[in-house]
């Protein structure tokens, strides 16, 4: 069983600039770094890292990873991809810091995905046996800080077709979707966790990525995102928001990192059991209050996508 | 000495609809009402009312009122207006509920202004002598609620000329202003209280009003304004925001009432002594981060004004 | 598989007084009521109700209910209780409004428990097909309002022994526990959802209940709980808090309803996968920062328990 | 005219430890430091500093300072103290960084007080003429941060007698007070600004100081104070709170610095004109909801005072 989205890897063209943006400004914590990558953790995460920033030719998605509930689940998923004739390969423990054996695949749309079970957790025991939960570090925090990774938003050519993989094979549960004027799903939100989504699929001319999202504790922290960017004289990197989506109830602020990766900082989505039926938004309703529950105009730049970066993933 | 903005009167075309919007939705409390007007109080005000909604042919400003520190101050202001050849008249106590003797005038630009000293306060003593400060009523609150009236934003033909009246005669202190490409003040923010402003004057083709502002306790409540409007299926009445102004640091959400009056719900401006020098924003800086500290587009509708409603004020 | 805590039933001695406290003051919504019971819903719940208040001889727990992921799971749980020689019975759909077939049992400690799969959800489709998620009703909210039911905190004679049932048979995952001076578990926190707990078991001289907890959106709303009680001149019903627990990171305010039921209003616990190992607090650490992360004294009244009310449950 | 409380000087026994507490943990900004003193500024202050921490033999109050509205006001205050036969002396500009000429006096109770008009403000103009208001620095903030100094709470032998000086001579306006069982004022809250108080006087066996208070933006930041202390493993330095006072409506958290100075971090008091009559709390009402609006016990340690440190002030 897939449990949840666990981490994402994004391309950056300068690791020092990446650190300034993600660590110094937004408040991510550095778990580890080498000449190629920076491994970051959000403040409430038990996993030792959830965001990997890797030197690349441009911004874009390098991979996303899901945690599964047992080691055996990797076998099952390997068989599933083999049977579906999808590229996959097993990689040994330690390919990424703190991570056990993993399975790397390409989705039918070409999105690079990793599945793993074992992953190092933050040590909650201090000297003397005193317990410190990961988030109890306000005394050394700054920036937002982000609380935990929440979802990735992808672009595919035909969301309905992609559901064969995500919903029927990987058992993602569709929480909400909206349809085009012909009644066909245009964007679908799906999850393995009980929140509104771990993955969203939106229609586009080619497979791509739209954003990676981190949860914060309240709408106040979402607004603080905009303040942080503007106070740092980077208002132009505020992509869209703050605002509220009708779909998923998310309170959002989308920002671009200095390389062009779009990060959503968001709060206030909901919890709902996985077996519940999807909520359907008609096109007029989506256009009226589904995308933006309030009344803001959506800037054209928000329609732009992030590429999937090439690699020999699976 | 003028102490602060104390109340405003706006025109509405339907008192029942006005009550639904201001009381049921936003959370103002009704102090008194008659067939002509509804008198409302915000949750943290000691004055028994601060917003008067009066049946009129359209939305617009009917008058604004300032509280002065002594009864004698009315004499001084009367003399000042007489000397300046400005229309004025004294009105007896009780012309408005809870209010003592008042002086009614027109500013040189034609804005109807009232000055008073005596005004009834909320009774803080409950049966048995128990004290209840006005804001300690969360058990019966809903909506935002607004905390207290803060400022009015006016339009005049030549803000620099209008300063002769507001700054030089009424002793308002300019906190901030921005200049046009020729270095002439385009909008000025002024105050008698120690907050960023009680009155703002912006350049326009004629004298008019832009908005009346109520303070709330935090940016969270400003965002709640947008949620309230959208949840009530009135997203089209969200005029602009939520967002942050660079000038005054105000966190704002502008809404329209059902009649077209623009109300700003805002939080987080600052305190600064009245004798401090004005802060000057150049035009490029104002356009970059002065109007909007973040990066939102300003919708064209936000440039529209509210009329000054005719009357035989002074 | 058990999914999560779904509802709780508490005894009250006056339904009208119960409505004034839970609905008028705290902001629960009424789903249904009859001469015996009041069925209430919290603002972000999809289930049509989660709190049942029933006329009884005193305050106390009448039952708690868990939702399971498939109808067949009821068979499995029935067999499990039969095999364990625990009292159980099946009850038909409709025994409680909106609920399908259910299984009612007594835990080995004598706690009345219900399992069900089918449960009516809030209709999210408005006239005209417009979607409204359950929480998008700020325009008609007041009080807190509570967001959703979160956990029950029970008392048992030997928590370690009770784990045989809860952890080994029902597959609850222990998230945290603290041990007495001999190293034996004194209180354990367990969950089927991915939050810190659905159920806690604390050692006591007899089986009992300590509190039922509702989640709110932020520590601000937790504090508002204390303001609501005090503004309503009920400060004596604030039992403990606001404060923060070290265990579970919960930001809490415990209140008593007018009948003596203890309700925890809380925010800010964490998410962690169910397969992760329990976190162990030593007794000195628990006494230092585990129970109260800050420095408040725990009032003696907080040690009191709520009874399990008698019935012919299973 | 006295405008407001402007700064306070406290004794510390280790400047490096003081910096760790006030700057690294709470988030004050360093304006200047020398071998004797550390000058700190809160995030929303226009004055370049408001807290001076000076090497001394123990914790305690070294002086408090008020800003006056004109340079001439120093003459008037000098005459007033001369006439009242109170010790005073003029000190030249620069005795403290950024400060102009000042008048130093002892109150009749022996509290060291400074009055000044000129004081350097933060430069709001960045390179290129861009404006940055002082609080728009979230990108480099951490800790709370405190927003601005608000009040000092003093102890005197007879508050009623002390009003002769504070209210009758210095023109402070009493906002609230509570009386003992004989109806005599036990504590009085007074202000020159329009908030609930700049100075409070409580009855005690000798002249002393109780705390210095800094405002934060919301109750959320007050709670964060407790989190900061506890996360830094300093829960024992949380003196009292978080909670809400009935008097002044203040949401408070009192902490001790490592030397014993008591600092109140607070939010949410009110604005009221200076000419309004004082609000009187009876002793039973004060004991019931005046001191603590909710229901917490007041720890005995909260009754302790801070000394007035000796010096040749005036």
Image: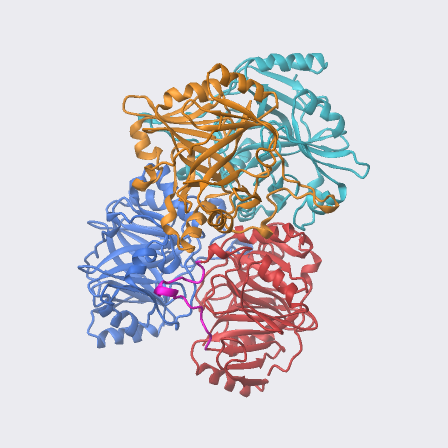
Chain colours: A red, B cyan, C blue, D orange
Whether residue A164 sits left or right of residue C92 in the image: it is right
- Seen in the picture, residue B20 relative to A124 is either above or below; the reply is above
> Looking at the rendering, in which quadrant would you find the C terminus of chain C?
bottom left
Residue C163: image x %, image y %?
26, 70
| Image coords of residue C47 (percent x, y) | 40, 59
Give x and y (percent) for residue A285: 59, 56
Viewer-proximal residue, D67 or B155? D67
Magenta-span inclusion, residue A128:
yes
For image coordinates 65% across by 49% down, the residue present is: B294
C73 in relation to C246, above or below: below
Q: Check the image and name the residue furthest to the left.
A: C205
Residue D41, image quadrant: top right
User: Going by the image, does D173 lie left or right of D130?
Assistant: left
Q: Is residue C161 visible?
A: yes
Task: Provide the residue span drawn in magenta.
Answer: A118-136
Q: Which of the pair D13/B198 is nearer the observer?
A: D13
Pick the front one: D77 or A17:
D77
Q: Is residue D266 visible?
A: no
Total numbered badges shown on the rendered structure: 0
Q: Is residue C174 positioned above or below D46 on the image?
A: below
Q: Is residue A117 left or right of residue D134?
A: left
Magenta part mainly helix, strand or loop?
loop
* Figure check: B170 above or below A201: above
Q: Quadrant of residue B286?
A: top right
């Amino acid at each position: 069983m897939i449990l949840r989205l666990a981490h994402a890897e994004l391309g950056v063209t300068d690791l020092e600039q990446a650190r300034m943006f993600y660590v110094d400004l937004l408040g991510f914590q550095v778990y580890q770094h080498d000449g190629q990558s920076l491994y970051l953790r959000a403040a409430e995460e038990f996993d030792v890292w959830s965001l990997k920033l890797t030197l690349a030719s441009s911004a874009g998605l390098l991979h996303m990873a899901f945690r599964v509930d047992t080691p055996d689940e990797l076998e099952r998923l390997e068989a599933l991809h083999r049977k579906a004739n999808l590229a996959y390969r097993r990689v040994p423990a330690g390919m990424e810091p703190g991570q056990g054996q993993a399975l790397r695949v390409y989705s039918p749309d070409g999105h690079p995905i990793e599945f793993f079970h074992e992953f190092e957790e933050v040590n909650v025991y201090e000297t003397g046996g005193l317990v410190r939960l990961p988030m109890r570090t306000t005394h050394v925090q700054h920036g937002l800080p982000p609380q935990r990774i929440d979802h990735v938003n992808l672009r595919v050519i035909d969301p309905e077709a992609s559901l064969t993989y995500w919903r029927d094979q990987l058992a993602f549960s569709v929480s909400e979707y909206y349809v085009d004027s012909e009644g066909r799903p245009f964007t679908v939100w799906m999850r393995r966790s009980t929140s509104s989504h771990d993955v969203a699929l939106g229609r586009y001319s080619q497979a791509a990525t739209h954003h990676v999202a981190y949860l914060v504790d309240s709408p106040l922290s979402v607004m603080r995102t905009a303040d942080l960017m503007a106070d740092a004289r980077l208002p132009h990197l505020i992509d869209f928001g703050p605002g509220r989506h009708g779909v998923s109830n998310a309170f959002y602020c989308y920002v671009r990192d200095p390389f062009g990766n779009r990060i959503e900082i968001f709060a206030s989505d909901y919890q709902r059991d996985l077996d519940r039926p999807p909520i359907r938004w008609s096109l007029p309703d989506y256009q009226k209050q589904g995308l933006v529950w309030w009344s803001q105009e959506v800037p054209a730049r928000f329609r732009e996508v992030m590429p999937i970066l090439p690699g020999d993933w699976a």
